[in-house]
Image: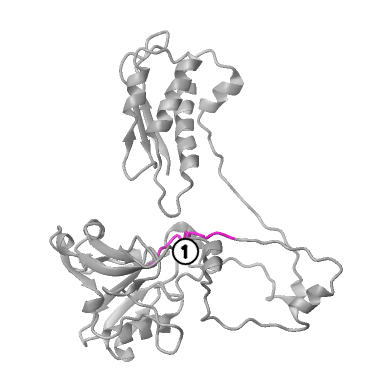
Amino acid sequence: YVNASFRFQVDSSFKVLSPPTLNFGGIGPYTIFASNTSSYLVGKSLNSVQNLQNAVGLLQTELVPDTPPGAASASYRQTLAIGLFYKALLSFLPNLSPAVQSGGQEYIRPVSSGEQSFDTNPALYPVSAPVSKVEGIRQTSGEARYIADRPTPPGTLFAAFVLTTTANATLTGVDWSRAAIAPGVARTVSAKDLPYVNNFVPLGTGPAERIFVAIGETIDYAGQAVGVVLADTQANANSAAKLVTMTTTAIGKPLLTLDDAVAAGSFYTDGPPPVQSGDDINAALAKSDHVISGSVSCGGQYHFYMETQISDAVPTDDGGLDIFSSSQIVDFTQRSAAQVTGLDQGKIRVKVMRIGGAYGGKLSRC
């Protein structure tokens, strides 16, 4: 998250003698050194309110946060970084009022604790009897093992998805050449390499969903997979995936909000029909003495499971697969793997050690 490190060389009057170190993390993919602000402060007194205001103004131009998925807003992170700069100055400037000086002091957070109080009826025990969570001690102590804690078998390859950055477009080309020769890369996999079906939804359980977008097909959303890069380490796979380039042809304007979708008449129609009971809604409203109208919308959410999507597939000596997955529907994972690889379901064994959070996001995506 947003962090910073500072070093100032000052004289007895708190005039800056050399370019101070002003490093900020969590603003972009790499650490930022605020060089313009550092140069400005040389020879300036840190006791001057005007000098500090000018420095903050320069920091605002140098600290321009990126906007990765799930991150706090750019404006908030910029404000937080500038606040750390201010906090650093308060930590050593003299003659400050106690109220102001407290802003530069380290906050020592005490050990947290919590308790729950609720009524129970002993006559109904064991129903409603307070008991500890079965795995609570193992999870809080760190003894509980998850898939990422398994020893990595020799020869394991790690996968990194190659994702689209546009939506409502046609995929016209993908260039894998730079990724294919990147350090540690074993091979790349795209739609044309799938031996059987390009669909990970088990047949008969719902609408088909492509594993990878093939050349000539429509891209439904930004972030849709066009393939994966397999490499000897996760870091090498991630780096190589960034080297893949693709070309697209726009079909129309991307629909980025609910209002855009409503205006374009773009609705999801594959779900179950709505359930209605009683009088017709419009007729009931027409007979009402008062009708209050309005709208409520909710933006997308970014799921923060402690354990993200993860699976580990190990070939077996009988030509099958042992799949270690954090799936919430084990048979879904087994059937999906079978139809994609062409193996009998009986040759695919799926084991779920435990799930480190899911919120339903691992029902059909793991």
Q: Residue 68: x percent and y percent?
A: 40, 51
Q: Which residue is mark 1?
A: 255
Q: Is residue 152 visible?
A: no
Residue 95's place in the image compared with 115, above or below, is above
Query: Residue at 45% across / 54% down in the picture?
Result: 70
Looking at the image, the residue that sits furthest to the right is 289
Q: Amino acid at mark 1?
A: Leu
Magenta stretch: residue 315 in it? no
Question: Which of 155 and 268 lies nearest the eye of the viewer?
Answer: 268
Question: Which of 17 and 266 lies nearest the eye of the viewer?
Answer: 266
**Side (left or right) of 93 relative to 40:** right
Query: Residue at 48% across / 16% down in the picture?
Result: 50
Query: Residue at 57% across / 83% down in the picture?
Result: 272
Q: Quadrant of residue 118?
A: bottom right
- Quarter of the image containing the C terminus? bottom left
Question: Which of 120 and 213 lies nearest the eye of the viewer?
Answer: 213
**Side (left or right) of 106 relative to 248:** right
Decide: few, some or many residues near mark 1? Use Cα within 10 Å; few <14, some 14-19, many ≥20: some
Q: Residue 63: x percent and y percent?
A: 39, 35
Q: Quadrant of residue 111?
A: top right
- The magenta stretch is 298-309
Q: Secondary structure at mark 1?
A: loop
Q: Residue 352: x percent and y percent?
A: 40, 75
Question: What is the tally of numbered marks visible in this picture?
Answer: 1
Q: Is residue 264 visible?
A: yes
